[in-house]
Amino acid sequence: MIRFLILTVGCLITLPTIGQSTFFKRYDLIKGSTAGFQSVFRTPNGYIASSIVSDTSGNEYLGYLGISESGNIRFNKLDTFLSSSPKFGKSIKLHDGNFISLFTGQWFDSSSYLNTISYIVKFNENGDTLWSEKLDSFPDRLFANKIIEGLGGKLFLLLTYQTANNTDPLIVKLNSSGIELNRASFYNTSTYESGKVITLGSDGNLYVSGIGRKFITNKNSLWIAKLDTSDLSTIYAKDQLLNCGELNDLIQLPNGNLFVLGDTSRYFHKLSLSPRGSQLAGYWFDTSGTLLHYRLYGDSTLIYAYKKTFALDNGNILLISDDYKYDSLQIVMYEIDSVGDIIRENRFGYPHGVWGSRINEVTRTDHGGFAFAGTLGSDFEGGEAWILILDSNRCMDPTCRTLIFDKRLISVPENQDIRSEITLYPNPVNNLFHLKGLDPNDMMQIIVYGLDGSMLMERKDVFSSSPIDVAGLPNGMYILEARSDKGQHFIKFVKE
C-alpha cells in the first residue's frame, strides 16, 4: 500500500539561472524521518529523490519523491517490502534509465542482537519497484558501501564483510536482474579495514581503494587494488603507507590516472559535542597503483562531512564538499588542475543552516549541472529534506563567494610539510588573526596579497605566536603567504 510521506512544503528560493531551472527547495518529512533525501536524479519529467522515511509508528521504509522541473511534488511512494529497517545506502542511475539503491538494513532480533545485512532495489522514474534482492547468503554483518554499473548491465557491489577477527572488502557481481554471478573477498594482510571506493577503469578492470589501521603505529593507511571484472581475481593490492582518514570517492581521469578523494580525520562523528576538524585529501595514482602525488585542501579547523569528485571536460577535477563549524554550513566547490593546484573556489551557504545539516549525495544532471540531496537539521529531531539544483559548476547565486586563482601571479613552490602544519584563525578576520601549528618561537615573514596577485602588506621577523594586525585592509578576500626556514604556505582569508 502506498502511503503519503509529505506533510508540508517549505519555502522556495529561486536562484539566477542559465538555461535550465535552478532552485533550492525544502520538504518537511514526517516527524521522525531520519535521513532526509539520500539521492536525487534527473528524469525526463523532472527529478526523482529517494529517501529513508518513517511512518507514524516508527517503521522505516524506502521512499520515492517525484519532483517537477520547478521543484513541485509530482508523486510520493513508499516501498514496504522490507522486513528490516533501512539505515543508509547509495543509489545510481543505470544506462537503461532506471535506478538502483544499495543500502544497509538493521534490526534487533528476539535476543536483542543487532543484525546488519545489505539489500539492493531497482526502481524506475515513477518510483515503482522493479525488483529487489536481499543479500541473505552472507553472515549477519554486511555493510553496503558503493555500487557501480559495468558492461552489459552487470552490477558490482562493494561491501564490508565483518567477521569476528577481520573487516574485509567484498565484491559481489550481479547480472542486470539482480542474480549473483560471483563474489570475491580480497584481503591485504597489512590492513585491518575495508574497501571504501570503487570505479570501473577504461581498461575494463575494477579499481578499489580503502583504509587499514596499523596496529603497530596506530595510524590509518591507504591501499589500492585492481581486480579482473570477469572472475574478480586480484591483479594487485598495494599498501601505500599513507596516513589518511576516511575515503569517499574514486574516479578515473581523462589522462587515465586515478584520483582518490578523502580527508585527514578518521574519527569524526557528526553528533560529537567537540568534533575535530579535518582537511580534504586528494591522491593521484597511475593504473599500476603507484602514488604520483597528493595534496591537502581546506581549513583544518572545519569539518568536511560529504565529499564527491567529478572529472571535468577540460581535464580538471571538481571537488564538492560541505564544511561547517558550529552552526555555519556551506557548500564548497573546488576546481583543481592535473597537478592539484586550485583554479577556482565557489562557496555558498545553506539557508537557515543548523547543526546536523549536511549533503547526502550529489549527482550530475544531463545538462551539465548538479543535483544535491540532503538533510536540514539533526537526525534525532526529524530534519527536513532539501534539494538544490545547479545548472553548472559555476557560481550563479549572488550571495556566493568566488575565488579565481591565476597561477601566473600567485603560484610559487610550496613545502608540503609546512602546508599541513599551519592554520589561520579566526577566519573571517576582524582586525587581528593568529597562526597556529608551528613552534611559537619560529620566525616568520608574513605577506598579504590581493586576489590579483598584488602585494598589500609585509611583516618581517614575526614570531609565529604573535597576532597579525590587518585592521588597515578594507573588507574583502586575501591570500596570506607565511614564510619560514621550513618552507612557505598560502592561506586564503576573509577580512570583515
Image (tube, rainbow, N blue to C red):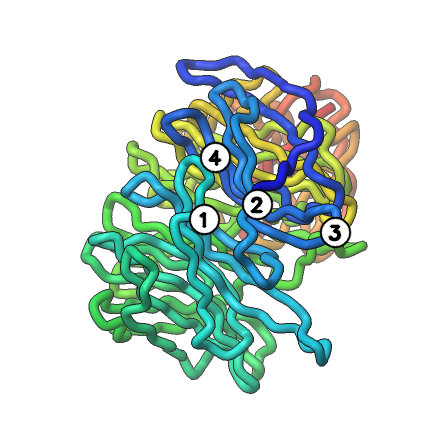
Q: Kindly report the distance in space between the C-alpha atoms of the residues bearing marks 4 and 1.
A: 11 Å
Say what secondary structure mark 4 lies in.
strand
Q: Residue at x 39, y 45 (%)?
A: 99
Would you name the residue on which mark 1 appears?
A: 91
Q: Amino acid at mark 4?
A: Ile
Label 4 to label 2, Cα distance in Å?
20 Å
Under mark 1, the amino acid is: Ser
| Callout 1 secondary element | strand
- Label 2 or label 3, whichever comes before in sequence order: 2
Circle 4 residue: 48
- Badge 3: few (under 14), some or many (20 or more) residues near its Cα, within 10 Å? few
Instruction: Report which residue position mark 2 lands on.
Output: 1
Q: Nearer the viewer, mark 2 or mark 1?
A: 2
Q: Quadrant of the N terminus?
A: top right
Q: Which residue is mark 3?
A: 57
Q: Residue at x 70, y 21 (%)?
A: 473
Earlier sequence position, callout 2 versus callout 1: 2
Q: Earlier in the sequence, mark 4 or mark 3?
A: 4
Q: In the rendered image of this protein, does residue 245 appear above or below residue 379?
A: below
